[in-house]
Amino acid sequence: MQIVIPEKAYVKHYRKLLYSDFDIHLLYGGRDSGKSHFIAQKLIYDCLRLPYFRCMLIKKTYNSIKESQWQTIKDIVEAWGFESLFTFNVSPLTIECINGNRFLSRGCEDPQRIKSTKDPSHAWYEEGNQLTMEDFITVTTTLRTEKTQIQQWFSFNPECDGDYEDFWIHKVFFKDCEGKETFEGEWRLKEDATYKYIVYHSQYKVNPHCSPQRSVFLEQLSDISPYYYQVYTLGKWGRKQNKSPFCYAFNRDKHIGDVVHNPMQETYISFDFNRDPICCSVFQYYDDTIFGVETIKLSSSNIYELCEELKLRYPNTTFIITGDASGRSASALAKDDLNYYQVIKRELELAQLQIKVPSINPQLKQNQVLVNAILARHKVVLDRYKCKSLIYDMENVRVLPDGTIEKRDRNDPAQQSDALDTFRYYLNTFHSIFLRL
């Protein structure tokens, strides 16, 4: 039986990918661009024409696959009149082709089931931005067959929690191609595993099947939310807006730059003590400018390790110490019956005059006024790379209606505020007079 799928069945924007020999394809962009529909079409085509094809349909959760990839493939098969060539099974959630090729559903909550899949040749990650690097590595290292070329397909909108520049998809595939929307590259997993990939951008305007009503709605997002317009309409990476920011005067254009530590100037270290992570920030103040040199976070609460890091990174430096007042208390004992600041004094070989820690932490409402007054009226520059944690907190830490910082969920990076706390303590100790000027 000869099967012919006319080229016009595919949206013109994607046709160049029909015979692609790339190992990894990342189709990203806005809503209603037809990227998932095309991937489903392409995989159906490959399933019919290749002598060997075993494709894993991947999503974050197994239960969500049926209403997305599985159903999309079923709809296209029926639209093309190929029902007699495929069997759609619900339990287990599979699709079987008359030629012996198959689609298998796999959720990332069960990595062992992914690993035990026998000789898969293809993978389609739907909503790939919801997956972790670990999920991706698990699938990539499971794909193994010599019967055909292994290929992986991603479909996703360019959004993530936190700063997209720190998100694994952006770091692995986008970081060296800033400003480009569609481009090619190579990714090396290990010495003998190099993958050719293509990043392919789209938005609703490339899809002739996008209805006029949807087009109008997507354009109206510019009046509703600049972030949603950037991500869902234009299909570009964007940063989520914080509707109740602690640092409402923070401005990326004004406050982010390149900072080099000046060994001729005093170096201020501000500490915040948590079980995970322990954190400190390095500041300098000269030429009427506050410089954020670096924020250091350790995935443990080991103050000894943090002090060792400071000595390695800033040798022969005169430190002045401030930070969380609770580090003085008896409940903050590190070991040897020493509190955090006693350990810092000993490990960094400091004089008592170099420890400048107030007896109590600043009141949040008053401290928020100080932080934003300085951001608005004083020159502050944070290093764009070494202060990423602090910049993230500046943009994402939220204030609750009662004036407190939202910290109910330590698993949410936006509710940790460890780096912001170091900035607050530093300003309270050394710049609180600014409000009285």
Image (cartoon, rainbow, N blue to C red):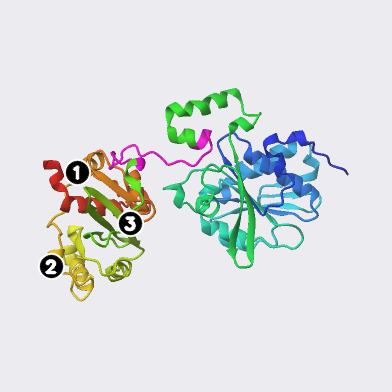
Give the alpha-carbon distance from disc 3 to disc 2, as whole Å: 28 Å
Q: Which residues are magenta?
A: 231-253
In the image shown, does 335 or 408 lie closer to the viewer?
Answer: 335
Q: Residue at x 30, y 48 (%)?
A: 381
Residue 397 position (above or below residue 315)? above
Which residue bears the numbered disc 3? 260
Mark in the foreground, 3 or 1:
3
Kindly identify the amino acid type of the residue bearing the numbered disc 1: Leu
Main secondary structure type of the part rendered in magenta: loop
Indicate the secondary structure of the residue bearing disc 2.
Answer: helix
- Give the label on residue 370, or none: 1
Please report contact status of discs 2 and 1: CB closer than 8 Å, yes or no. Answer: no
Indicate the secondary structure of the residue bearing disc 1.
Answer: helix
Kindly identify the amino acid type of the residue bearing the numbered disc 2: Gln
Residue 221 image offset from top left, x and y in percent: 47, 29
Q: How many marks?
A: 3
Q: Is residue 216 left or right of residue 240?
A: right
| Crowding at mark 1 (Cα within 10 Å: few <14, some 14-19, many 20+) | many
Question: Does the magenta-highlighted stretch encompass residue 236?
Answer: yes
Residue 79 seen in the current view = no
Residue 53 seen in the current view = yes
Indicate the secondary structure of the residue bearing disc 3.
Answer: loop
Quarter of the image containing the C terminus?
top left
Mark in the foreground, 3 or 2:
3
Q: Is residue 310 left or right of residue 96?
A: left
